[in-house]
Image: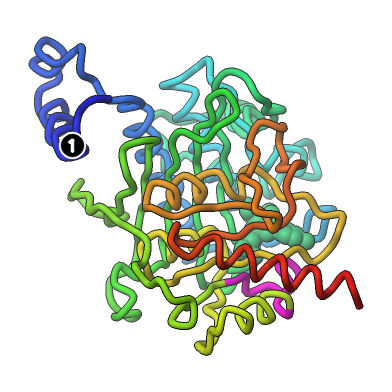
Amino acid sequence: RALSVKQHRSMSQLKYKNTFIYTRFYSTSIAYLEKERAVAIKAVERASRVCQAVFKRLVTEETMTKKDKSPVTVADFSAQAVVNSILENDFPDDPVVGEEDSKDLQGEEGRVLREKVVDLVNTATEHPMSSDEILRAIDRGLYAGGSTGRHWTLDPIDGTKGFLRGEQFAVCLALIIDGRVRLGVLGCPNLPWDMSNPDGERGVLMVAVEGQGAFQRKLNSSSNEEVPISVSSVIDTKDAVFCESVEAGHSNHSDNANIAKILGISKPSVRMDSQCKYAAVARGNAEIYLRLPVSDTYVEKIWDHGAGNIVIHEAGGRVADIHGKSLDFSRGRTLSANQGVVAAGAQIFDTVIAAVQETLKYKSQI
Ligand SMILES: Nc1ncnc2c1ncn2[C@@H]1O[C@H](COP(=O)(O)O)[C@@H](OP(=O)(O)O)[C@H]1O
Ligand SMILES: [Mg+2]
Ligand SMILES: [Mg+2]
Ligand SMILES: [Mg+2]
């Protein structure tokens, strides 16, 4: 823990090159969550590759709709199976709060979909997995969550609607210990590496561990090079850009627009699916992420925010709900203590929350 980020990274390279020397001489200095970090990166990379393969081959035929009307594809199931089986292998005692479950893949009714998932998963795993093993891996995601001990939270495809449109989506994995997010990995296969060159190279992975800063690296690259990232240095909100969901059903576009107006923002919002919005704020492509609730009854899920939350914090930003309260990941599978989400750089955060309050106060009066 006492190591600087730079020392810590150069030592972990030493470890990759020669495990023996590393463990022998540096065993007392292994960085906090070093193994978890490496395993989570590997799992998110593999799952991202599965999603990309599906998009190329199957996406048009393979969409179905869950009870809550949200779409789910063969890629969501396959990516959850891939990540969960890697986690089970390296951390067999760690439970997982995952978005998907195997119900729709079971029995005769689920046969066609199940066979596609089995095929896909087996293109991504080191050892072939049987159909039963795959369903069991998916259902390792049924954990209830809570305030004590360790558990992971996984969104195998966040932004399924973006994925289906060929736009932004993210594979999101976070580790929660005693109710707080300690590690997060965001795999963003369609996010441009350089936002000023949107047609250039795509595929970004962001990773953050509590106290160690946030980094980005290229997804699908043989290089392990990591670049530190930080939020924008804009301190006057009128120069800011804000991002929000593409889907008006996920976030209240008109409340978001009112807040932007109070903040003096004149640039149009950047609409983007998935936790790629957190990624955009974390590396300074946008200053603010607004997710004002559309309904009083919807409760946000921990897998939709865990990884993004720590990436923002470690990049120098803050995340809270519309009341300015930190997101509480200790309540189980949902963020039942919170409403909506706001993220921004630390320097402008209080100003943004004040504008949110003003908008909500005005709404409650009319
Ligand atoms: N009424 C609602 N309000 C807020 N979020 C919602 C919602 N209905 C669905 N969602 C969540 O919004 C997520 C996508 O967010 P975004 O709009 O930022 O891309 C979905 O994740 P999945 O795509 O993983 O199902 C889903 O969990
Ligand atoms: Mg979903
Ligand atoms: Mg999601
Ligand atoms: Mg999802």
Q: Tell me, yes or no, whether the highlighted magenta stretch contains residue 15.
A: no
Nearest the eye: 139 or 115 = 139
216 relative position to 176: left or right: left
Q: Is mark 1 within 8 Å of ligand 3?
A: no
Q: Amino acid type of disc 1?
A: Arg
In the image, residue 162 lies at what x, y percent?
A: 58, 68
Name above or below for residue 362 compared with residue 179: below
* Image quarter hosting the C terminus: bottom right
Where does label 1 land, which residue? Answer: 9
Q: Residue at x 63, y 74 (%)?
A: 246
Q: Is residue 84 above or below residue 344?
A: above
Does residue 205 appear in this view? yes
Q: Is residue 366 left or right of residue 303?
A: right
What's the colour scheme?
Answer: rainbow
Near-viewer residue (151 or 93): 151
Image location of residue 94, percent across then percent down: 53, 20
Number of numbered discs overlaid on the protein picture: 1
- What is the x, y in percent for residue 129? 50, 30
Q: Split into 4 quadrants, where in the image is the N terminus? A: top left
**Residue at 61%, 52% in the rendered image:** 320
Left or right of 126? Residue 108 is right
Task: Using the rendered image of the protein, determine whether residue 163 is visible from the camera's viewpoint.
Answer: no
Residue at 46% from the left image edge and 78% from the top image edge: 240
Give the magenta range. Answer: 244-254
Towards the viewer: 237 or 81? 237
Q: Percent position (x, y) of residue 36? A: 38, 28
In the image, residue 193 above or below residue 45: below
Quick one: which residue is furthest to the right in this view? 366
